[in-house]
């Protein structure tokens, strides 16, 4: 298995999660849907944390994950969503040891 997992937590400014979600829906959702290297993508809005967004991404490999960060869509998303975030995202990644 060469898949690569990425776990992301965004903390939004108070009350700005829906604004950040709107940016994601407009820019990232179509980019992810069009990207054949995204094997899975889960975008979550925890009920008990109103200013948190968590995402799980599974890419074909680590190179594909890094390449996505250089796409025009990701760069536009990053520039646009920043005003709604309370700092940079928390990101962890690792090779997938097993995937069902």
Image (cartoon, helix red, strand yellow):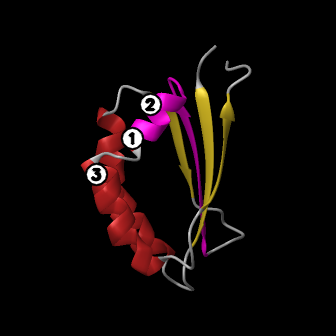
Q: Is residue 6 above or below residue 47?
A: above
Residue 10: x and y in percent read: 58, 65
Reply yes or no: does residue 21 show up in magenta.
no
Q: Is residue 27 above or below residue 52?
A: above
The residue labelled by disc 3 is 73
Residue 44: x and y in percent read: 58, 54
The residue labelled by disc 2 is 64
What is the number of the mark on residue 45? none
What is the number of the mark on residue 68? 1
Which of the marked residues, 3 or 2, is nearer the chain's N terminus?
A: 2
Estimate the spatial distance between the alpha carbons at disc 1 and disc 3, rounded to whole Å: 9 Å
Which of the marked residues, 1 or 3, is nearer the chain's N terminus?
A: 1
Residue occupying image coordinates x 35% and y 52%: 74
Marks 2,1: beta carbons within 8 A: yes
Neighbours of disc 2 within 10 Å: few (<14), some (14-19), many (20+): some
Q: Secondary structure at mark 2?
A: helix
Q: From the image, state whether disc 3 or disc 2 is nearer to you.
A: 2
Marks 1,3: beta carbons within 8 A: no
Q: Residue furthest left?
A: 72
User: Dividing the image into 4 quarters, which one contains the C terminus?
Assistant: top right
Residue 39 in view, yes or no: no
- In the image, the segment drawn in magenta is 51-67
Q: Please give left or right for residue 73 compared with residue 50 in the image.
A: left
């Amino acid at each position: 298995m060469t898949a690569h997992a990425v776990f992301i937590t965004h903390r939004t400014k108070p009350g700005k999660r829906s604004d950040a979600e709107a940016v994601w829906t407009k820019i990232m959702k179509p980019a992810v849907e069009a990207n054949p290297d995204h094997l899975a993508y889960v975008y979550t809005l925890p009920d008990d944390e109103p200013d948190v967004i968590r995402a799980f991404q599974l890419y074909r490999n680590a190179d594909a994950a890094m390449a996505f960060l250089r796409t025009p869509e990701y760069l536009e998303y990053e520039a646009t969503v920043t005003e709604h975030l309370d700092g940079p995202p928390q990101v962890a990644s690792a090779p997938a040891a097993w995937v069902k």
